[in-house]
Amino acid sequence: MKPTIQAFVFDVYGTLFDVHSVKTACDEQFPGKGEQISQAWRTKQLDYFFTRHIMGRYEDFSVVTRDALRYALSAAEVTWTTETEDALMATYAELSPYDEVADVLQQLQHKQTIVLSNGTDAMLKELIKNAGFTDLFDELVSIDGIKQAKPSPAAYMHWFKNRGLKRDEVLFMSSNGWDIAGAKNFGFHTAWINRDGKPIAMPDLAPDAVYEDLSGILEWVTDEAAWP
């Protein structure tokens, strides 16, 4: 039997918004080093977040993001001021949404649309507001409320537990393979937004569908939803 999806749950960073849109601001501050700084910033952001979580030394995503920026700047062998650091941190509230996002969200307005992110409440609210998406979501949910990061089962339960839904009535979308594996392990249907054409990292927790961008998830709106 094909699933009837009631709730569309979105990751944010890399899924709705291009985390590497910070490259322009990095290049303005440090000409020729924007790409290097952007890549190291994102890599170390996830590294710090997961490592601290595993060690039981949780820090919220804004703290980790700033620490990762400092690492990226040090690795690029540049000198910076507090003002420069603050200016680059501010770009996380102005990330560029991917081209198809607004249209897809508009077409889902008869369904529940939810953000579930490792970002803090303040980070999510500001980012979504600046993009003009506030009215397109029913809920913005941060795992900071329980300090249990995705892909921990507790992070997905944080949103799900009081919603009166069955797990197979939820489609979870992310561009991050580890997030897709976590949501699949929890029991959600999953759609991997594989913008970079990467191979599936965990075949035992493979996504139900793989798309190049979010437009593909519209197949799940009707009763003829995509299903393997």
Image (cartoon, grey):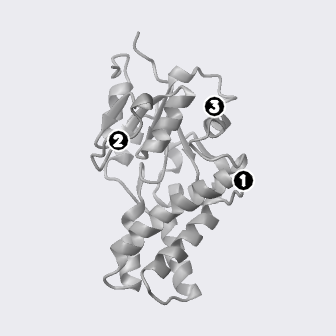
Residue 17 lies, in percent from the top left, at 42, 55
What residue is shown at x 30% (from left), y 38% (from top)? 211
- Which is more N-terminal, label 3 or label 1? 1
Q: How many numbered callouts?
A: 3
Is the C terminus in the top left, top right, bottom left or bottom right quadrant?
top left
Please give the residue where the numbered disc 3 appears in the rendered image.
160
Please give the residue where the numbered disc 2 appears in the rendered image.
214
What residue is shown at x 63% (from left), y 56% (from top)? 120
Q: CA distance from mark 3 to mark 2?
A: 22 Å
Amino acid bearing label 2: Leu
Label 1 or label 2, whichever lies nearer to me, is 1
Q: Residue furthest top?
A: 1
- Which is more N-terminal, label 2 or label 3? 3
Is the N terminus in the top left, top right, bottom left or bottom right quadrant?
top left
- The answer to whether 41 is drawn above or below residue 104 in the figure is below
Q: Nearer the viewer, residue 48 or 165?
A: 48
- The answer to whether 32 is drawn above or below residue 110 in the figure is below
Amino acid bearing label 1: Gly
Please give the residue where the numbered disc 1 appears in the rendered image.
56
Q: Which mark is residue 76?
A: none
Q: Residues within 10 Å of mark 1 (few under 14, many from 20)?
A: few
